[in-house]
Image (tube, rainbow, N blue to C red):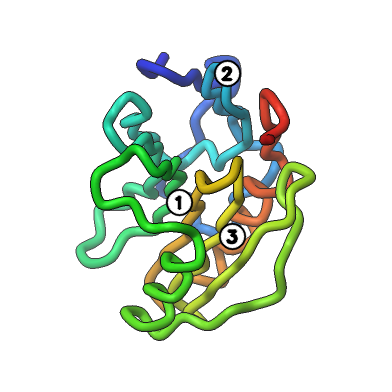
């Protein structure tokens, strides 16, 4: 049990030596952030809970023992009251300038129209507005050689995301 969220203990962990292609929906775990949301993530990924920090965040990392950039899913809640806050439009522009990201087709996440940026073969960021200025940033990042293998798992996280209450 995490400090502010819970992971479904009924699902057995996967064999961490299994190839990436073996990640499937039946091996997913449900993660719940009380009063906020719930979603599914691959059981092979290890979660890190920082939801009670100034910038609330949870991350899911594939710990496979290799060196270099890990496979990462990260969800953060960004609000004007936080130090260093930038609004959603500025965050999208920063992605474009700093990472060379491009806007891609908007998508619906938990019934909300979301902005999406991507760096082909490297990362995808989904921005879900949750109020006048607040938003969730949901990031997928992976090494180029494994990016395509885990993109479906990230899409599954987005498809299964449910808000505890509808944003105003």
**Residue at the image point whose x is 49% and y is 18% from the top:** 6
Quadrant in the picture for the N terminus: top left
- Closer to the chain start, of discs 2 and 3, is 3
Q: Nearer the viewer, residue 164 or 6?
A: 164
Q: Residue at x 33, y 51 (%)?
A: 85
* Disc 3 packing (10 Å; few <14; some 14–19; many ≥20): few
Q: Earlier in the sequence, mark 3 or mark 1?
A: 3
- Local secondary structure at mark 1: strand
Res 47 seen here = yes
Mark 3 = which residue?
A: 21
Q: Report the residue marked by disc 1.
A: 73
Foreground mark, 2 or 1, reads 2
Q: Is residue 44 above or below residue 155?
A: above
Image: 14 above or below 31: below
Residue named by callout 2: 35
Measured as percent of width and height from the top left, residue 19 is found at 50, 57
């Amino acid at each position: 049990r995490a400090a502010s969220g819970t992971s479904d203990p009924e699902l057995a962990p996967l064999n961490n030596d299994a190839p990436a292609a073996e990640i499937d929906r039946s091996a997913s775990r449900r993660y719940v952030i009380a009063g906020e949301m719930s979603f599914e993530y691959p059981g092979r990924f290890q979660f890190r809970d920082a939801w009670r920090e100034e910038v609330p965040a949870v991350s899911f990392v594939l710990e496979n023992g290799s060196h270099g950039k890990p496979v990462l899913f990260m969800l953060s809640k960004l609000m004007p009251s936080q130090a260093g806050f930038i609004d959603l439009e500025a965050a999208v522009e920063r992605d474009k300038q700093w990472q060379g990201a491009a806007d891609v087709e908007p998508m619906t996440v938990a019934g909300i129209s979301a902005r999406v940026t991507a760096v082909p073969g490297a990362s995808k960021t989904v921005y879900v507005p949750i109020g006048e200025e607040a938003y969730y940033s949901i990031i997928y990042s992976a090494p180029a050689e494994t990016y395509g293998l885990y993109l479906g798992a990230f899409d599954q996280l987005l498809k299964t995301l449910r808000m505890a209450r509808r944003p105003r």
